[in-house]
Amino acid sequence: MPPTLASLVHHSALKLTVRAGGDRLDVPVRWAHVSELADPVPYMEGGELLLITALKLDAEDPQEMRRYVRRLVGAGVVGLGFAVGVNYEEVPEALVEAADAEGLPLLEVPRRTPFLAISKAVSAAIAADQYRAVTAGFAAQRELTKQALGAGPEGVLAALASQVDGWAALYDASGAVVAAAPEWAERRAGRLTADVERLRDRPAPASAVVGGEDRVELHSLGTGRRARAALAVGTAAALGTAERYAVHSAIALLTLTTERSRSLHAAEQRIGVAVLRMLLAGESDHARAVAGDLYGELLDAPFRLILAESGSASAARARAEGVVGPTGASTGSGAAVGGGGGAGNGGAAGSSGTAGRESGRYRAAALAAATANGDPLAQLAEVVEAAAARAGEAVLVVPEGERLVVLAVDGGAAVAACGEFAAALETARAATARGAGATGGTSAAAGAPSAAAGPAVSAGGPGAGPAPLSASAAGAAAASAFSEEEELVVGLSAPAGPIAVSAAYKQAEQALSVARRRGRCLVEHEELAAGSVLPLLADDAVRAFADGLLRALRDHDATGRGDLVASLRAWLSRHGQWDAAAADLGVHRHTLRYRMRRVEEILGRSLDDPDVRMELWLALKATSAAGE
């Protein structure tokens, strides 16, 4: 405790007497200051005990004393010490009345007590208080370190909560509560997720104070530019010096426990790359031997391979494949993220409330990546790793330049989190496009699909996808959001085992290619087998091929010399059955035979070749899909 006026009055060596303001002696004293100026206020900082002899004051003038005392109170002076036997034999009544009227404690200082003794007493008390705080801080640091070594982050939080006489909570990079102490504080900490996410978006180190039921301090944890975790400390009042030492010690220890060293992280990355290469080469036994216990039972259970690609790489590949961009609207009802027992049916499903909180967290991460010039690829890695950590799952995350490869437990929290994040990102993209259109701006997401083409199923089940983001919030960032570098495309393989990783990688690549062509964030490989091949024909390159193949026949029909295109379609649809096809056309079968010979002559290709029949049929379907 810092010195107070009461402690100075009770100091046996000072012999101070209270003449006014006896009910306000519990106020702390920051310093004792001597000044004989008629107006010492410009030199006060507040919290001082002012010592005077009234050398330049008319202490018997009631009006002057009222002005003097009023100014001292306004400056934050906590007490006035008046030395008797120097200029006045006793404390003037005018000063006593003025101090009493303003509620300012007035202490009579006997002649045998020098001001220096009072200053020394205050200084000694302040030093003792600081020493106690430092000693308590070191003791807290030792206890926190002991808990960190023995019980980990949970022990640190419990010790910190005891030190500050409040509660403490640890959050991961996604804003989810990892641990809290005492247990009742977890619900209170969960209500601060939005504040933690805002703190995470600020450059580290960062801190904030949140009001409400109690006073809560939020601190980012980590040594990089972006926080890896956050600490919340809730107390009934502002922290004292000793409590502040404890909080700073906890920040350092939790940073050490949550921020792995660069060398260790790099080593794990190299092991992950080696394990993935062995799996892709079919050397699953060697991969298990190298991985050891690092990835738990991941390599012994069915898993999914997730292949994510940044927008710049995706756009480059699309141009190389002849696809201008995601301008071709997605056919069908949109991305059924999690369909067929995939991401949407992952093990992260819980109560509807939990699913809603998870969806909100992924939506916030997606919006942060989309509207704050973020990196969706890095955000996806954080979301997947955080979800796996919360569920106690093993996950293998390997960055490959502008790609990210993830092996995650089939039906687990990490796969569900990937689907939720992709759904949230696609919703954010659609909302950004709508917001930009509403404000009349030029949308950088001109090729983004509409909300109707967005993901329809989330981890919470059908229809439980994330709510659309507000157009106003997304539209405000439309000018900078969703550049090529900020887009994200994800392909998800079917469930596979360690001996089939190469096949799973190819499946994920195929799903990624379809997602890129359809302008969607995520496509599962199982969707490709469950649907029809016809939607794949809705592509500029395919339509160009179809137009070129059928152009000569259309030119022939344009002269009025026969309907070769319609005859070819009818013949192919009837599998080459002359009578049935002729009946559909209303012509004699010999007429149809003549027309098919003309088709062969014009195209220079034989209809006996099954490859030719297949190409012609697909060309007819492609032009039909285009409305031609």
Image: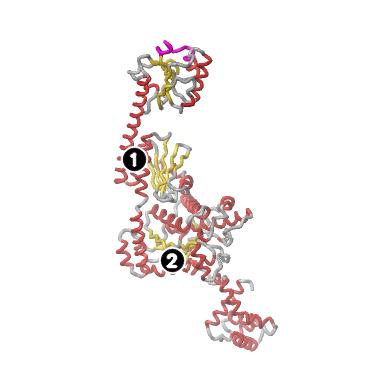
Based on the picture, tell me whether residue 93 belongs to the magenta stretch: yes
Q: Which residues are magenta?
A: 84-96
Residue located beneath label 2 in the image: 494
User: Is residue 464 visible to us here?
Assistant: no
Quadrant containing the C terminus in the rendered view = bottom right
Front-lying residue, 540 or 440:
440
User: Is residue 371 visible to us here?
Assistant: yes
- The chosen color scheme is secondary structure
Front-lying residue, 440 or 494:
440
Residue at figure coordinates x 51%, y 60% from the top left? 487
Q: Residues within 10 Å of mark 2 (few under 14, many from 20)?
A: many
| Magenta segment, prevailing SS (helix, strand or loop) | loop
Q: Above or below — where is 27 with respect to 372?
A: above
Q: Position of residue 540 (x, y in %)?
A: 58, 71
Residue located beneath label 1 in the image: 159
Q: Amino acid at mark 1?
A: Ala
